[in-house]
C-alpha cells in the first residue's frame, strides 16, 4: 500500500528533491497577491511535509520574507526590525502582509489618475535622389554663372 501511494524510496527521494528545488527557487510572481502566493507556497510545503521533509516555522517565515519583490522591501525591513522572526507565527506574518496589501490597493484606488501625453517623433531624411538632384542643380547654376561672367568679360 505504501509503495502504491508514495512509490519506492527512490521515487520518494526524487519527489522530495524536486519539491525542495521548487521551495528554494520560490518567489512571488509579478501581479500576484499575497493570498495566491501563499496558496502556492503552502502546496509545496504540504506535499513536502507528507513526504517527511519538514521545515521549522522560522525557516518558513524567513523564506516568505525573501521571496517577496522589491516593492515589499520597506514592509519586510519593518517586520525584521520590529519582530522576533524566530517566534513570529507564519499566520501573523501573512495577516500583516494581507493588511498591508489592502492598504496599498486602497491608496492606488484613491489616487487621481494622471494624464499622460504621448509624443510622436519624426525624422526627415533626405533621399539619395534629392541629394543627386541638388548636386546637379548646383552644377548647372555654377555653369550658368561662369558662362555669364565670361560673356560679360568678353563684351
Image (cartoon, helix red, strand yellow):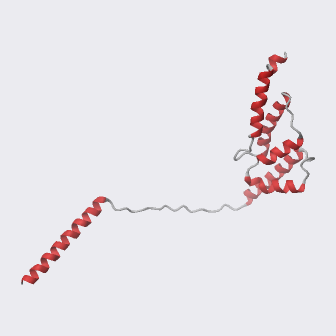
Give the answer, above or below, for where 56 lies relative to 10.
below
Q: Where, quadrant-wise, is the N terminus in this rendering?
A: top right
Residue 148 found in image quarter: bottom left
Residue 63 appears anywhere in the view: yes
Residue lying farthest to the top in this orientation: 1
Q: Where, quadrant-wise, is the C terminus in this rendering?
A: bottom left
Measuring 83% from the left and 51% from the top, which residue is drawn there?
99
Measuring 83% from the left and 27% from the top, which residue is drawn there?
51
Residue 113 found in image quarter: bottom right
Question: Which one is nearer the viewer's eye here, 154 or 71?
Answer: 154
Measuring 79% from the left and 29% from the top, which residue is drawn there?
16
**Residue 122 position within the rendered picture, expressed as x and y whole percent measured from the top left:** 44, 61
**Residue 152 position within the rendered picture, expressed as x and y whole percent measured from the top left:** 10, 83
Residue lying farthest to the right in this orientation: 87
**Quick check: 92 left or right of 131?**
right
Residue lying farthest to the left in this orientation: 155
Give the answer, above or below, for where 37 lies relative to 140.
above
Residue 105 appears anywhere in the view: no
Count the numbered circles shown.
0
Measuring 79% from the left and 51% from the top, which residue is drawn there?
101
**Residue 69 position within the rendered picture, expressed as x and y whole percent measured from the top left:** 73, 50
Give the answer, above or below, for where 44 lies relative to 28.
above
Give the answer, above or below, for where 148 lies relative to 19.
below
Amino acid at each position: 500500500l505504501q509503495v502504491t501511494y508514495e512509490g519506492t524510496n527512490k521515487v520518494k527521494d526524487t519527489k522530495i528533491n524536486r519539491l525542495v528545488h521548487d521551495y528554494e527557487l520560490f518567489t512571488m510572481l509579478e501581479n500576484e497577491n499575497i493570498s495566491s502566493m501563499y496558496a502556492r507556497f503552502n502546496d509545496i510545503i504540504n506535499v513536502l511535509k507528507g513526504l517527511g521533509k519538514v521545515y521549522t516555522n522560522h525557516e518558513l517565515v524567513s523564506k516568505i520574507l525573501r521571496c517577496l519583490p522589491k516593492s515589499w522591501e520597506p514592509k519586510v525591513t519593518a517586520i525584521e526590525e520590529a519582530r522576533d522572526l524566530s517566534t513570529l507565527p507564519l499566520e501573523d506574518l501573512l495577516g500583516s502582509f494581507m493588511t498591508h496589501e489592502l492598504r496599498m490597493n486602497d491608496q492606488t484606488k484613491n489616487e487621481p489618475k494622471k494624464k499622460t501625453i504621448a509624443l510622436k517623433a519624426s525624422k526627415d531624411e533626405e533621399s539619395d535622389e534629392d541629394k543627386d538632384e541638388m548636386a546637379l542643380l548646383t552644377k548647372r547654376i555654377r555653369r550658368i554663372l561662369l558662362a555669364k561672367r565670361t560673356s560679360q568679360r568678353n563684351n
